[in-house]
Amino acid sequence: MRIDKYLWCIRVFKTRSLATTACKKGQVKIDNTSIKPSKEVFGNELLLVRKNQINYQIKVLDLPESRVGAKLVDQYRKDVTPKEAFEKNEMLKFAKDYYRKKGTGRPTKKDRRDIDDYQEDTTEEI
């Protein structure tokens, strides 16, 4: 079975075209080697899939005939992704939520105070 079809069948990607695009971008690897979407996948291979800034490690157990339901996915793959990958993603989420993007609206009170403090420090040195 093709790797893009397999990833779609086990519900890693919502559409087969998304799986194909991920393969072309090098986000899907077998044994740390980027592969084409047409690469055949066999049992007992370890896939590395980068999705949402997480490097998933998926072990192929069996090949499904077609797309399977969410409850049956574990018969065809085993997720061996280390827990540290998910914890790292959680920490990134907290870091991103605290600060707003540059150039989005007016400065907050804290931003204004920081700007004023900076301007006072630079005028005192002159």
Image (cartoon, rainbow, N blue to C red):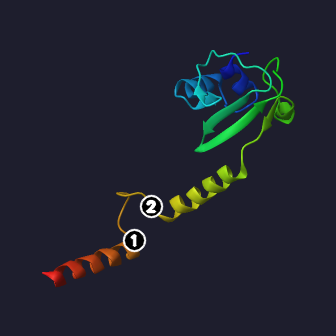
The residue under the point 64% across, 34% down is 49
Q: CA distance from mark 1 to mark 2?
A: 10 Å
Residue type beneath disc 2? Arg
In this picture, residue 39 sits left or right of residue 79: left
In which image quadrant can residue 66 be found?
top right
The mark lying in front, picked from 1 and 2, is: 2
Quadrant of the rendering where the N terminus is positioned: top right
Question: Is 4 drawn above or below residue 97 in the view shown?
Answer: above
In which image quadrant can residue 27 be found?
top right
Question: Is 119 drawn above or below residue 26 in the view shown?
Answer: below
The residue under the point 61% across, 53% down is 89
The residue under the point 68% across, 53% down is 84
Q: Secondary structure at mark 2?
A: loop
Count residues near mark 1 (Cα–Cα under 10 Å), then give few for <14, some for 14-19, many for 20+. Answer: few
Quadrant of the rendering where the C terminus is positioned: bottom left
Residue type beneath disc 1? Thr
Q: Residue furthest left?
A: 126
Give the x, y percent position of residue 54: 62, 44
Question: Is 56 drawn above or below residue 95 in the view shown?
Answer: above
For label 1, the residue is 108
Q: Nearer the viewer, residue 109 or 24?
A: 24
Give the x, y percent position of residue 94: 57, 62
Question: Is 125 drawn above or below residue 53 in the view shown?
Answer: below
Of mark 1 and mark 2, the one earlier in the sequence is 2
Q: Are marks 1 and 2 in contact (CB under 8 Å)?
A: yes
Give the x, y percent position of residue 29: 62, 29
In this picture, residue 13 sits left or right of residue 126: right
Q: Secondary structure at mark 1?
A: loop
For label 2, the residue is 100
